[in-house]
Image (cartoon, rainbow, N blue to C red):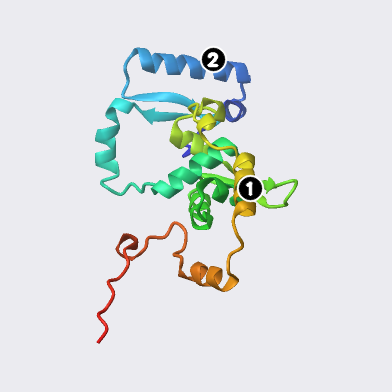
Amino acid sequence: MSEEPVAAATLAGALEVPLESVTACLTELQKFYDETHRGFELRHLGGGWRYYTRERHADVIAAYVLQGQQSRLSQAALETLAVIAYQQPISRARVSAVRGVNVDGVIRTLVARSMIEEAGQDEVTGAIVFRTTDLFLERMGLHSLADLPPLAPHLPEVSELEAELGQLAQAAPQADPEAALEAATDEPAADEPTDDEGAAAPEQDQP
């Protein structure tokens, strides 16, 4: 009856039987459903056990239940989620440094959808850091973060990125403050689309 994965310890407490017996029964059920090719399966994900429709039936079930109502994460949200998953716990500023854009809005979306959560504060800066949730593991079909694909080596280390940005800032000539202010006010907000995909408006002929 639960809408979320149930831990074996919770089931053992409800049934008043040893945890080892519950774990053995769950494993036996899982094997039985696989061997008899049932339309559903029992999975151990996100720290608990839950029934799922078999993957080969997913399209049929989705068409019947969802009927086009499934809400997908944007590309920006997926990229931000990937950075957090591999670098967690990580602050908002560090995620922005890795992606090169402001991620405030995306972070709020991921928190609202329970894909990430606050995980305390950074010991050095005091900034709030974020981590992925059990719902993230469940949606991604993972038992733990150790099951993440080996993509982390392809992501730049935040410390190396910040050092590189610092070197570039020191090597760059001092900009005119007024010109910098004017350029900043003309820039579109990060992660927000611009009119006509950023195309400039044509100039008007002068009389």
Helix, strand or loop at label 1? It is helix
Q: Residue furthest right?
A: 124
Residue 132 x/y as whole percent:
55, 40
Q: Residue at x 44, y 56 (%)?
A: 191
Vertical placement of residue 126 versus 149, above or below: below
Disc 1 designates what residue? 167
Specify few, some or many for label 1: CA neighbours under 10 Å numbering under 14, 14-19, or 20 or more. Answer: few
Q: Residue at x 33, y 27 (%)?
A: 55
Query: Going from the N terminus, do you reach mark 2 or mark 1 first?
Result: 2
Q: Residue at x 52, y 54 (%)?
A: 103
Vertical placement of residue 159 versus 23, above or below: below
Q: Is residue 12 left or right of residue 51?
A: right
What is the three-letter code of the residue carrying label 1?
A: Gln
Q: Residue at x 45, y 25 (%)?
A: 43
Residue 197 x/y as whole percent:
32, 60
Disc 2 designates what residue? 24
